[in-house]
């Protein structure tokens, strides 16, 4: 792939390097390029439900080892731009926007607030397929932050249920969970001890989107940049900076959150099989010392459960009181350094 940058000219060049399939050259192409990335039209979420889904090219100097990033619940793909810029221009970083945020459209055939994590899984799988088959872009690393980490686990589970895996179907060599939510099978203080009640005051009824979790930019510092001792960290962005960055989603579907937390009509959190990342795709689990949602002390249990590796060989603990849930925004260099330091990790080698 020729080098391309975040510009209209660069993306046009990219489209020339990655010609669309014959079907894509029709009057209603399934994929179109814009100044920041690619819009995948009519992605299927479930029977009778579709959405136009955007993938932002956060950094695109080469495609040799693309990172494909799944954002957290009330975040957007743009929330990973500080990380991509810190990582540097020699890396390819792609950020997928779930429906109704960034440049992705609201779903057709269902109210946004009724979407489930299962719908997000369908989006990830179809977009990865289209990236490969229509654009010849093959991410080798997939990253899931917070709720996106739960989706990543569920993606692997669905593939395993189908008799394949991230490695066999997409040749994805590495998976990285960053401050990831936990499945039912692993103890999780926030999920087990009233997480649904904690977010209930922020559930609103939107006349268009339906019932959603909405955290305005003014509340972001308290939610995502306050450490577990309740202190706002020095590097926290201001609400004005948060808004200007385009990091705030208009909402997260209430039903997806209910599924995540085992609340509402769901009697448990999603189930993930033990050892599901034991072979094929290498898993790293990143947790922050100051994160009050995903405790550093709990996360080794998530890693061991998903990999079967009790040595913690690829568990990555990032220390410091200022390491909060959204450290990829407030101090992305810490995450970049932690991933670089763990690049050579192996299961069974602490």
Image (cartoon, helix red, strand yellow):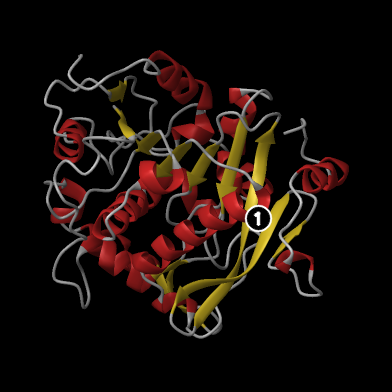
Q: Is residue 101 visible?
A: yes
Residue positioned 36% across, 71% down in the render: 254
Quadrant assignment for the C terminus: top left
- Judging by the rendered image, the residue that carries numbered circle 1 is 134
Q: Position of residue 161 (x, y in %)?
A: 24, 59
On screen, residue 104 above or below 108: above
Percent position (x, y) of residue 285?
Answer: 30, 32
Q: Is residue 79 above or below residue 287?
A: below
- Residue in the image at 13% along x and 71% along y: 267
The image quadrant that residue 320 belongs to is top left
Identify the residue at the far front of this view: 22
Coordinates of residue 343 in the picture (x, y in percent): 40, 18
Q: Nearer the viewer, residue 332 or 62?
A: 62
- Point out residue 120 in the picture as x, y percentages from the top left corner: 42, 63
Say whether residue 238 is visible: no
Toward the right, the furthest residue is 9
For image coordinates 19% across by 73% down, the residue present is: 266
Q: Looking at the picture, does residue 342 appear above or below residue 305?
A: above
Q: Residue 224 or 338: which is nearer the viewer?
A: 338
Query: Looking at the image, is 74 positioned above or below residue 335?
Result: below
Q: Residue at point 46% right, 65% down?
A: 214
**Left or right: residue 250 compared with residue 253:** right
């Amino acid at each position: 792939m020729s080098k391309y940058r975040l510009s209209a000219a660069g993306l046009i060049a990219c489209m020339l390097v990655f010609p669309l399939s014959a079907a894509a050259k029709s009057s209603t192409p399934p994929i179109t390029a814009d100044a920041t990335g690619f819009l995948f039209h009519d992605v299927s979420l479930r029977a009778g439900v579709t959405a136009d889904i955007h993938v932002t090219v956060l950094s695109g100097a080469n495609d040799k080892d693309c990172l494909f990033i799944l954002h957290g619940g009330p975040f957007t793909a743009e929330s990973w731009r500080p990380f991509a810029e810190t990582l540097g221009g020699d890396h390819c970083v792609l950020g997928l926007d779930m429906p109704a945020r960034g440049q992705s459209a609201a779903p057709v055939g269902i109210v946004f607030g009724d979407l489930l994590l299962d719908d997000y899984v369908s989006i990830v799988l179809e977009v990865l397929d289209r990236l490969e088959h229509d654009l010849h872009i093959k991410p080798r690393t997939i990253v899931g932050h917070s709720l996106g980490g739960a989706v990543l686990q569920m993606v692997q589970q669905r593939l395993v249920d189908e008799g394949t895996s991230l490695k066999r179907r997409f040749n994805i060599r590495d998976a990285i969970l960053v401050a990831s939510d936990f499945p039912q099978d692993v103890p999780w203080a926030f999920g087990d001890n009233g997480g649904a009640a904690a977010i209930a005051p922020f559930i609103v009824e939107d006349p268009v989107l339906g019932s959603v979790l909405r955290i305005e930019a003014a509340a972001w510092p308290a939610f995502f940049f306050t450490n577990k001792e309740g202190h706002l960290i020095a590097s926290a962005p201001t609400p004005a900076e948060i808004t200007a960055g385009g990091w705030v989603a208009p909402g997260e579907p209430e039903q997806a959150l209910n599924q995540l937390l085992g609340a509402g009509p769901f009697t448990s959190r999603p189930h993930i099989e033990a050892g599901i990342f034991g072979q094929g795709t290498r898993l790293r689990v990143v947790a922050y010392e100051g994160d009050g949602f995903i405790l550093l002390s709990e996360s080794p249990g998530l890693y061991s459960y998903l990999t079967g590796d009790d040595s913690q060989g690829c568990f990555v603990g990032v220390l410091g009181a200022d390491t909060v849930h959204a450290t990829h925004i407030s101090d992305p260099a810490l995450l970049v350094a932690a991933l670089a330091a763990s690049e050579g990790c192996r299961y069974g080698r602490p």
